[in-house]
Image: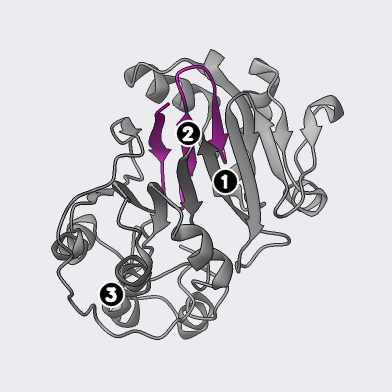
Amino acid sequence: MSLFITSLNSGSNGNCYYIGNEREAVLVDAGISCRETEKRMLRLGLSMQKVKAIFVSHEHSDHISGIQILAKKYLLPVYITPVTLHRGGLALDQNQVIHFSAFETIQIGDLRITAFPKIHDAGNPHSFIIRCDDITVGVFTDIGVACENVVHHFKQCHAAFLEANYDDDMLENGGYPFHLKRRIRGGEGHLSNKQALELFTMHRPAFMSHLLLSHLSKNNNDPKLVQTLFDPYADGTTIVVASRYKETELYQIDNAVINTVHIKQSPPKTEYFQASLF
């Protein structure tokens, strides 16, 4: 059985990721409006009736702003930690709120969703792995560093949403004040392009077919720069830069092994600094 994935939006203006099979699906975060979520899914030929739940990574507004209306309209359960619910100030029907714990697997139809802790400037942040049969998709955004949890789960993925938030030079030479640059690099924000590339080149499994580079900064990154940086290391993996303005294509993920020769190339050296919040 295949999994189908798309980024409905990715960036500080809103994040929403769709993962599902032919019968059911989940959203990881819902940071765009209900109307935009519906419009973008419709353009992809997707039905909201297939969506069975929303999983919430953390309380920042670009990940939760669309949840209340979306959950109410479609009577969707919202999987969220107590800390994230409290800090996000979400007014949800208590019958729709389901708390989850790290490393607990939740079964929704044929989908198995597992959360794990990540490093980010939030109360109780988590990333997610979604499995169906022997196919695995990971959502790795809003991570300050590629910690052991991230590396361990990334190695299992046939496809992944991976943050590539900022370019080091653009951040350094940009107009942000010093305190904000320090916050961006402080270890609890997002991954830089080079950090994401290092994770990909060092830990990409041979069977990874798709990498959706996500949560690009509007001010400190450029989609063409990111595409150009990653393409030489793709080695059979389809590299997609997710937009902050529209949905990506819908990608079908299966468990076919990629039969390509791996060319060993050394990515730029980088320290595991924190990435930006913007």
Left or right placement of residue 169 versus residue 188 in this view: left
Crowding at mark 1 (Cα within 10 Å: few <14, some 14-19, many 20+): many
Query: Identity of the amino acid at label 3?
Result: Met
Q: Quadrant of the C terminus?
A: bottom left
Q: Residue at x 69, y 38 (%)?
A: 106
Q: Does dot 3 land on a helix, a strand or a loop?
A: helix
Report if the CB atoms under discs 3 and 1 are less than 8 Å apart: no
In terms of secondary structure, where does tag 1 sit?
helix
Q: CA distance from mark 3 to mark 1?
A: 25 Å
- On-image quarter of the N terminus: top left
Q: Is residue 214 above or below residue 66?
A: below
Which kind of residue does numbered mark 2 sit on?
Ile
Query: How many dots with numbers?
Result: 3
* Foreground residue among 275 and 151: 151
Q: Report the mark closest to the observer, 3 or 1.
A: 1
Whether tag 3 and tag 2 are in contact, CB under 8 A, the answer is no
Residue stretch rendered in magenta on the structure: 1-29
- Identify which residue is drawn at 52% across, 58% down: 153
- Is 48 in front, or is 154? 154
Residue receiving disc 3 = 170
Mark found first going from the N terminus, 2 or 1: 2
Q: Earlier in the sequence, mark 3 or mark 1?
A: 1
Residue wearing tag 2 = 19
Residue 233 point in image, percent of width and height: 19, 65
Judge whether 222 appears above or below 207 on screen. Answer: below
Q: Is residue 221 left or right of residue 183?
A: left
Inspect the magenta stretch and tell me whether residue 18 lies in it: yes
Q: Which mark is residue 175?
A: none
Q: Which mark is residue 63?
A: 1
Q: Residue 46 location, x and y as percent? A: 41, 18
Query: Marks 2 and 1, Cα distance to the nearest angstrom?
Result: 16 Å
